Amino acid sequence: MDLVALKASLLAASLVLPTIAAAEDIAAVDGSSTGDIVITAKRLDNARDAILPSLGASKYTFDRAAIVTQPQGQDRSLTSLLLQAPGVVQDSYGQLHVRNEHANVQYRINGVIVPESITGFGQTIDIRLADSISLLTGTLPAQYGYRTSGVINITTQTGAFDNGGDVGFYGGSRGTIEPSASIKGSSGGFNYFASASYLKNDLGIENPTSTRDAIHDRTDQFRGFAYVSQILSETSRLSAFGGAATSRFQIPNNPGQDPAFTVNRVSDFNSSLLNQNQHEYTYYGVLAYQYSADALSVQVAPFARYSRTTFTPDPSNGDIIFNGFSDRSRLSSLAYGVQTDASYKLSDRHTLRGGFFFQNERTRSSVTSLVLSTDGDGNQTSDVPFPVTVPDRKTGQLYGVYLQDEWSITPQLTLNVGARFDAVHAFTTENQLSPRINLVYEPSKGTTFHAGYARDFTPPPQELIGTSTVAIFNGTTKQSEIQTADAVKAEREHYFDAGVVHTVLPGLTVGLDGYYKIKRNLLDEGQFGEAVVLSPFNYERGWAWGIELTTAYKNGPLSLYGNATRGQEKGRKIVSSQFFFAPDELAFIATYPINTDHSQRWTASGGASYAFDDGIGHLTPTADFIYGDGLRADDPAGIVPNGGKLPSYVQVNLGIEQVIDGPGVLKGLSVRFDVINVGDKSYAIRDGSGVGVGAPQFGQRRGFFGGIRKTF
């Protein structure tokens, strides 16, 4: 598996500056040859990437070969793929924690920010659309803001270099059915790419029990993506892309739960028969104009995104019998704005970069809760539920501007200095000037040192902030013990990072990186209601540290890689959304720092592949694994919140693919077989305990899958 591109933004890549080489004598687009158009397209791609370099950050890239040469190949989910990157921790509901932070991950497509959807457990982006996927971490240059724990940049496939497409079918255990198709092509300066897939199975969300199959866990998911671009001249291009994701989930049941309330004279209910459902919809689109000539490169990209999530409780009032209430919720968000980035080569030693970002977001929520009345001691006084509806809406804005200078002090030493100013006006009104500095030293070919400092500003996700109304539920089974509801604030961070990447032997690369973070108003999220939508809150102070070791080896048909991370994050004193927590929990955390619930001490991943030339094509067996030391859980003694941890686990996956390269109708045909969780390891991702943890979830048990694909 070619999981190289393990590097700390190697200097050579960062110093690429788009120019029109005199020797390239590129003809005008109209009437030009296909070769000229391809050269222009490639040069514009390089120019786009050079506007937003990752100088000084740690970068881990999955190229197209790495994406398709792994267990499940391009039928794998984006979340599962990213678990193979260093410092990425697995959690429930498809969540990822990069360097032990909760969420705080930004997604970009072709360098343009895709606004966050209302996170539940749907997968908005399908890896079939990707030509490469990169994860940036560390002290990011000034062009990266808002979500800074990790930046996932997806470079899409296009039709600029070849025509064709594919159609495939994948399926297997737990009723998995996944047909997919893609098409790409070009005509003159116009090129296009489109893909679509449909997924149906009986494991939409992690099983709340350790059994092999979940109860009531069907999902149906559709994802589509389209990209078009037109080369306007040898210096400019207009591109547009967009996608849609619709998902329907049954909420899996946990049998054997004890009823706690009486509803309409019914006080008994089988928890395995609950019928809760959640639907998620996300649509996004981007229009990008790019200009690149001489010393100047500019990209202007307006964007829009609409997202909606609805949750429907059990229609037989089963939720109320167990919890004392049921929530029917509808959350929606419409975001639109513009992102502009530019670079200008001042001299041989200085490259200036700058840009601005604006986003307007309109969020709406409506939660209708069926509750029961209670007395002053919280005892149920009636078995007849009644509704309480809490509507909410908010329009908020994000503003950002940055400027930085890449200074090549010597051929081996580069200093990138800049700053960005960000402001948020929504549920909170705050701003910050954030300096950034990164130093990259390349003493010899194959060795790169980097060190940096970044001041980061992370606004709370507007689409997830719910009502602060608490008193409306007083005298009901949804009354909170805590009546305080301070507003969620933006996180502010001092980030220090240093590392080295060294080519030990031809094909063998080793990297070591260390970081330390000091946080004010540390943002975290938890599941506090019935809907599987997380709600944010702040710790007053937070700290995080970690060390990452990365290795990659490539020698002809053999690819090996391995990553290991040791890290920790702690927070103290919850200062917003306090009504989500119990009084004794708040009191302890106000005095003592605790591990955040998503903090995992050790994380590791690795894999291998070998491509055999078997005469008719190539046969590629592949394997990978993930290791987790266990997320936090309740202290066994019941004293320290998040004072315990779950048992460690290893999950191993195997796959094999036969691709036929020969002539005839079978050319381009591939057949694959995969085994996920080969050892059938039963392990808990969550056990339902810990700060902000709503329910237990277990990892996927062993599954057998197969697929066939025809490329044309």
Image (tube, rainbow, N blue to C red):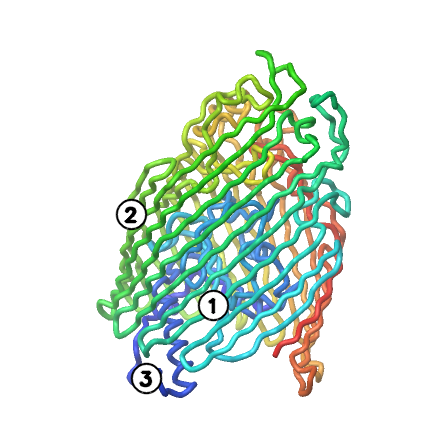
Q: Is residue 108 visible?
A: yes
Q: Amino acid at mark 1?
A: Tyr
Pointers 3 and 1 in contact (C-beta within 8 Å)? no
C-alpha separation, residue under disc 1 versus residue under disc 2: 32 Å
The residue where tag 1 is placed is 227
Q: Residue at x 77, y 44 (%)?
A: 211
**Labels 2 and 3: the sequence-earlier one:** 3
C-alpha separation, residue under disc 3 versus residue under disc 1: 23 Å
**Labels 3 and 1: the sequence-earlier one:** 3
Give the x, y percent position of residue 682. Answer: 74, 46
Q: Which residue, as the protein is rendered here, is positioned at the far top?
A: 376
Q: Nearer the viewer, residue 554 or 219?
A: 219
Give the x, y percent position of residue 272. Answer: 75, 37
| Relative to 342, 57 lies left or right | right
| Relative to 522, 631 lies left or right | right
- Disc 1, SS: strand
| Relative to 219, 541 lies left or right | left
| Relative to 526, 59 lies left or right | left
10 Å crowding of disc 3: few (<14), some (14-19), many (20+): some
Q: Is residue 409 visible?
A: no
Numbered disc in front, either 2 or 3: 3
**Labels 1 and 2: the sequence-earlier one:** 1
Q: Residue at x 43, y 64 (%)?
A: 110
The residue where tag 3 is placed is 28
Q: Amino acid at mark 2?
A: Phe
